[in-house]
């Protein structure tokens, strides 16, 4: 195999990897966007629950407190995951 053939083959392989990486990057962005959109809906629910808890702190049931706490922890984890994916 000539040097030109080797470089041509290398160039084609690099192009293939580049194209595949571009597709994966695009899909990853869409995944992250979908994840963000889901988290934003959860954020709205969380803010509503927090507002209710703050208003009715004395009367809030243990179950309501635990639900709000879990939702907050899940949101925190979700946002951390997105930050890691974006690095």
Image: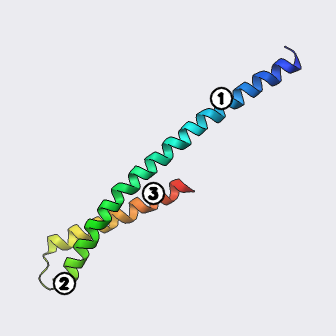
Cα–Cα gap, marks 2 and 3: 31 Å
- Pointer 3 residue: 81
How many other residues sit within 10 Å of disc 2, few (<14), some (14-19) or many (≥20)?
Answer: few
Res 51 label: none
Which circle's residue, 2 or 3, is located before the other in the chain? 2
Q: Tell which of 6 and 45 is nearer to you.
A: 45
Work out which residue is located at the far bottom of the displayed protein and give it: 58
What residue sits right under mark 2 in the picture?
A: 55
Q: Percent position (x, y) of residue 9?
A: 76, 22
Q: Is residue 45 above or below residue 24?
A: below
Q: Residue, x 51% and y 53% (percent of image)?
A: 85
Q: Residue at x 88, y 20 (%)?
A: 3
Determine the residue positioned at 11% across, 82% down: 59
| Image: 47 above or below 42 | below
> Could you tell me residue 35's position as x and y percent?
39, 52
Q: Secondary structure at mark 1?
A: helix
């Amino acid at each position: 195999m000539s040097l030109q053939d080797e470089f041509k083959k290398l160039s084609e392989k690099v192009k293939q990897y580049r194209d595949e990486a571009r597709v994966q990057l695009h899909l990853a962005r869409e995944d992250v966007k979908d994840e963000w959109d889901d988290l934003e809906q959860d954020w709205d629910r969380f803010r509503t629950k927090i507002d209710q808890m703050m208003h009715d702190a004395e009367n809030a049931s243990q179950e309501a407190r635990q639900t709000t706490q879990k939702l907050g922890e899940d949101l925190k984890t979700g946002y951390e995951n997105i930050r890691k994916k974006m690095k």
